[in-house]
């Protein structure tokens, strides 16, 4: 069942790579600003490793829900849940909540997410964590912006996709 209020926000390489050694593959300051602008004032849902990879948490002006399988996990300023279903239940009355990673969390939420805020880097990267292959025929493109990052010397695109029902 697709949840229209569940959105995924992710930066992926063209080979669907998203991370290596619990870190991002590239540094795009404009993408980090976009992430902040889109997620501020909303709930963000992530796995424990994603939380631990953040330089500082909790991120300001956002409710944090952390999915873990370790019953002893407690993270200051965050709510802890133990399943995807429990996370979905906690945000059922919210207009929009954002899935921010990592790979295992993305794989589990991909089939039920109603929106996808995608930063697509038009380059392959070596990685150990990948986003599920995006089936573009399941999505309607609502917005697209094509950009170039001179510092990293690659093209990238912002795509806002909505699940076609």
Image (cartoon, rainbow, N blue to C red):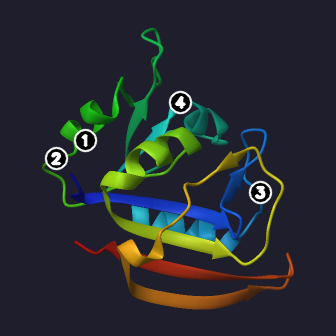
Tell which circle, 2 or 3, labels the residue nearer the N-terminal end. 3
Q: Residue at x 30, y 53 (%)?
A: 112
Query: In the figure, residue 29 lies in which quadrant?
Result: bottom right
Apparent side of residue 149 relative to residue 51 in the rendered image (left or right): right
Residue under label 1: 88
Per the model, the C-alpha gap separating discs 4 and 3 is 19 Å
In this view, the residue in front, 19 or 132, is 132
Dot 2 and dot 1 residues touching (CB under 8 Å)? yes
Residue 70 locus on image (x, y percent): 48, 14
Per the model, the C-alpha gap separating discs 4 and 2 is 21 Å
Query: Considering the numbered disc 1 on the image, is that residue within a helix, a strand or a loop?
Result: helix
Residue under label 4: 48
Tell which circle, 4 or 3, labels the residue nearer the N-terminal end. 3
Residue 124 locus on image (x, y percent): 79, 67
Q: Callout 3: few (<14), some (14-19), or many (20+) C-alpha neighbours within 10 Å? A: some
Q: Nearer the viewer, mark 1 or mark 4?
A: 1
Apparent side of residue 32 relative to residue 99 in the rendered image (left or right): right
Query: Considering the numbered disc 2 on the image, is that residue within a helix, a strand or a loop?
Result: loop
Per the model, the C-alpha gap separating discs 3 and 1 is 28 Å
Dot 4 and dot 2 residues touching (CB under 8 Å)? no
Residue under label 2: 92
Residue under label 3: 25
């Amino acid at each position: 069942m697709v949840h229209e209020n569940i959105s995924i926000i992710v930066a992926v390489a063209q080979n669907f790579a998203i991370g290596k050694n619990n870190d991002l593959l590239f540094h795009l300051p404009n993408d980090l600003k976009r992430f902040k602008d889109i997620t501020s004032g909303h709930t963000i849902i992530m796995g424990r490793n994603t939380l631990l990879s953040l330089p500082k948490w909790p991120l300001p002006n956002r409710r944090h829900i952390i999915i873990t399988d370790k019953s002893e996990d407690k993270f200051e300023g965050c709510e802890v849940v133990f399943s995807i279903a429990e996370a979905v239940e906690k945000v059922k009355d919210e207009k929009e909540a954002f899935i921010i990673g990592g790979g295992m969390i993305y794989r589990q939420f991909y089939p039920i997410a109603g929106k996808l805020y995608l930063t697509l880097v038009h380059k392959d990267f070596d990685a150990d964590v990948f986003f599920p292959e995006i089936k573009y025929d399941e999505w309607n493109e609502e917005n697209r912006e094509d950009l170039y990052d001179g510092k990293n010397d690659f093209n990238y695109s912002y795509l806002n996709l909505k699940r076609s029902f």
